[in-house]
Amino acid sequence: MKLKWKPKKLTLVIIPDTTQSVVRFRISHLSAYIAAACFSLLMLISITIYFLHAHTVKQASDLQTKLSGVNQQWSATLTSKNEAIEQLQNEVIQLSQQAEQMKTKVEEVKKLESDLKSIAGIDHEPSNVAIASTNSEGKAKKDANQPTVGESPPSTGVGGSPNPVSQEIILKLGQDTLASFSALNGEVQELQTNLVQTKQKVADKQEQLRITPTLWPTSTKVVTSPFGYRSDPFTKIPSYHSGIDFGAHENDPVYATAAGKVVSTGKDIYHGNNIVIEHSKGLRTWYMHLNKILVNKGDSVEKGGKIGLVGSTGRSTGAHLHYEVLKNGESVDPKPYLKSIRKDDN
Ligand SMILES: [Zn+2]
């Protein structure tokens, strides 16, 4: 049998409806294959495009989810930062208030130092710094420049914004507070130096007081004969009394009027039992007519220390203490020296 290539035809029939005639198409097998191939290719491309589109949509969705997450993180971070800033702002305000309180305290310490100098009687200079910081003018100036908690700070915006505290004001407050603390640091250092000097001056003053005969030599304050010219108790003729006589009972204690060193003890017909104490260069005290001497030459005595007992030895009409202050060997009036009493005499 012999095969012959005879192109086969395919007939496509289109029947619109019963009233119209039938349409016939005759196409070759090759055309049908080509059409099928084209259709398959078209389907493949469509499917590929579909999957590509689906993939892209999924990627976009993932990105959006990620972006949303990042956005939330940023939001949380921003909130946290804002809270931190607000807290810092409040702390700046509190620091500002503390600086003001410290200023007041420093002024109080300055006043105390001034008072201390006044009490100690050393180069007292009235301080007006404390007054300047507490007067109404100073207060008003402070209020105008530095807002405090509970008060609305002056607005720098246009239109009267109710914004309670602007960043600029907080920044300026922080800078002012830093300057205040720096200034306070300087003042505290100066105060420290002054207090050290004052302490030294007080110590010097105390030492000076220790060796200056300011105490009364007897418990009694009865002066029976002052320093100066008088009628001699024995001869009744005018004479010079080189000390003060204190009336006292026999054996009443006699005290050293300042700290010092006993330079002589002795007895003679005029002064009776007597003691001489040297306190500082050129300043001595002399205690006479004692019934008893309780110290020895060379002894160191403290201010207020008991050195003898009242008597009437020597040229005396009765129990009393004749007390002299000698400056560079010359008798001077002891009265200006007598300023303090012994603590247990109160
Ligand atoms: Zn006398």
Image: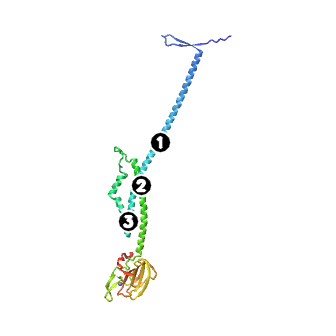
Image quadrant in which you'd find residue 109: bottom left
Quick check: which quadrant has ligand 1? bottom left
First-in-chain label (2 vs 1): 1
Q: How many marks?
A: 3
Q: Mark 2 sits on what residue?
A: 179
Marks 1 and 3 in Cβ contact (< 8 Å): no
Q: Mark 1 sits on what residue?
A: 74
Q: Give x and y (percent) for residue 129.
A: 36, 61
Element under disc 2: helix
Q: Give x and y (percent) for residue 250.
A: 37, 84
Dot 1 crowding, Cα within 10 Å, few <14, some 14–19, many 20+: few
Q: Amino acid at mark 3?
A: Ser
Marks 2 and 1 in Cβ contact (< 8 Å): no
Element under disc 3: helix
Q: Amino acid at mark 1?
A: Trp
Image quadrant in which you'd find residue 204: bottom left
Q: CA distance from mark 1 to mark 3?
A: 59 Å
Q: Amino acid at mark 2?
A: Ala
Quadrant location of the N terminus in the rendered image: top right
Residue 54 higher or lower than 305, as above or below: above
Please indicate, yes or no, whether residue 225 appears anywhere in the rendered image. Answer: no
Q: Give x and y (percent) for residue 346.
A: 36, 75
Please indicate, yes or no, whether residue 182 appears anywhere in the rendered image. Answer: yes
First-in-chain label (2 vs 3): 3
Q: Nearer the viewer, mark 2 or mark 3?
A: 2
Q: Mark 3 sits on what residue?
A: 114
